């Protein structure tokens, strides 16, 4: 795991969760290290429907294994995007961390 990716992630996540779960941040940093190296894929564009569909399909459904309704996923994504509204570049790891915590799916990673 790149410690640089972890360090950036933990600083960003602590803006939204002052008691950030170090083990979860480390696991997400390790799992998404390659994605985070590319500027284009390192952030989530909350205003891009295609991007949000990708997060729903590839992260919420496939990675977290959620079987809830599309509407419930949309609400969760909107909540996270609203929480992060002051951040122009929404870190993918932070978005994934907040979604993982929202659905209590930490066991997928740790």
Image (tube, helix red, strand yellow):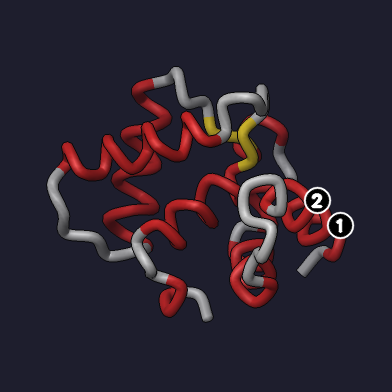
Residue found at x 69% / y 58%: 18
Q: Residues within 10 Å of mark 1 (few under 14, many from 20)?
A: few
Q: Which residue is outermost to the left?
A: 69
Task: Give the Cα separation between the discs numbered 1 and 2.
Answer: 6 Å
Viewer-nearest residue: 52 or 24: 24
Q: As displayed, is residue 53 above or below residue 22?
A: above
Q: Quadrant of the N terminus?
A: bottom right
Q: Which residue is outermost to the front?
A: 18
Write down the quadrant of residue 4 in the picture. bottom right
Q: As displayed, is residue 58 above or below residue 26?
A: above
Numbered disc 2: secondary structure: helix
Residue found at x 67% / y 51%: 13
Q: Position of residue 44 (x, y in %)?
A: 54, 33
Q: Position of residue 69 (x, y in %)?
A: 13, 47
Residue found at x 70% / y 46%: 15
Classify residue 102 as left or right of residue 65.
right
Classify residue 68 as left or right of residue 64.
left
Q: Residues within 10 Å of mark 2 (few under 14, many from 20)?
A: some
Numbered disc 1: secondary structure: helix
Q: Position of residue 33 (x, y in %)?
A: 69, 57
Q: Position of residue 30 (x, y in %)?
A: 67, 67
Check residue 60 in the rendering and tell me which mark sits there, or answer none. none
Residue on which disc 1 sits: 4
Residue found at x 79% / y 52%: 11
Viewer-nearest residue: 19 or 51: 19
Classify residue 97 as left or right of residue 30.
left
Q: Which residue is outermost to the top?
A: 47
Task: Please count the marks in the image.
Answer: 2
Viewer-nearest residue: 13 or 60: 13
Residue on which disc 2 sits: 8
Tell me if label 1 and label 2 are in contact, CB under 8 Å. Answer: yes
Q: Which tag is nearer the camera, tag 1 or tag 2?
A: 2
């Amino acid at each position: 795991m790149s410690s640089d990716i972890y360090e950036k992630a933990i600083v960003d996540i602590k803006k939204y969760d002052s008691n950030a779960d170090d083990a979860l941040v480390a696991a997400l940093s390790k799992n998404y290290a390659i994605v985070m190296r590319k500027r284009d894929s390192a952030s989530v564009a909350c205003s891009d429907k295609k991007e949000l569909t990708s997060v729903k399909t590839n992260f919420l459904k496939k990675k977290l294994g959620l079987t809830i309704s599309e509407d419930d996923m949309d609400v969760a994504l909107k909540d996270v995007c609203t929480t992060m509204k002051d951040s122009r570049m929404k870190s993918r790891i932070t978005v994934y961390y907040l979604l993982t915590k929202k659905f209590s799916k930490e066991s997928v990673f740790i």
